[in-house]
Amino acid sequence: MMFASSALVSLGLAPDPQTNESRRDLARAQAAIDMLLMLREKTNGNRTTEESQLLDGILYDLQMRFVSTFREAPASP
């Protein structure tokens, strides 16, 4: 949940708990999503069905939100 929350904050979809401000950092969001993907791979076979479903659902949601946010982001010069 910590990495999922970090990804949401980095996507600008939730305020930073320390500053209460929203800002985008797509590189940081990608790093949090990548960490969740790595954890899914490393814990394969050691999760319950419910844990796997939760992790898969979180990853799907974050990846779709990342793509949507990436498409909305202005192109850098």
Image: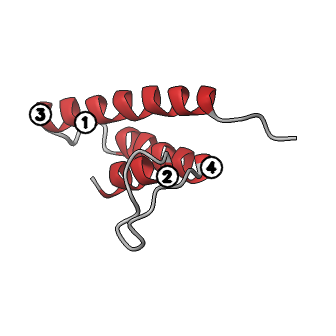
* Looking at the image, residue 3 lies above or below residue 45: below
- Comparing 6 with 38, the one in front is 6
Proximity of marks 4 and 1: CB atoms separated by less than 8 Å? no
Q: Position of residue 33 (x, y in %)?
A: 46, 43
Cα distance between the residues tagged 1 and 2 = 30 Å
Q: How is the image coloured?
A: secondary structure
- The residue singled out by tag 1 in the image is 45
- The residue singled out by tag 3 in the image is 50
Residue 60 figure quarter: top left
Please name which of the two marks, 3 or 4, marks the residue nearer to the observer. 4
- Comparing 74 with 58, the one in front is 74
Please name which of the two marks, 1 or 2, marks the residue nearer to the observer. 2
* Residue at disc 1, secondary structure: loop
The residue located at (41%, 45%) in the rendering is: 13
- The residue singled out by tag 4 in the image is 27
**Disc number for residue 65:** none
Cα distance between the residues tagged 4 and 1 = 29 Å
Three-letter amino acid code of the residue under disc 2: Ser
The residue located at (44%, 31%) in the rendering is: 65
Proximity of marks 4 and 2: CB atoms separated by less than 8 Å? no
Q: Earlier in the sequence, mark 3 or mark 4?
A: 4
> Number of marks in the image?
4
The residue located at (55%, 44%) in the rendering is: 30
- The residue singled out by tag 2 in the image is 10
Mark 4 nearby-residue class (10 Å; few <14, some 14–19, many ≥20): few
Q: Earlier in the sequence, mark 1 or mark 2?
A: 2
Three-letter amino acid code of the residue under disc 4: Ala
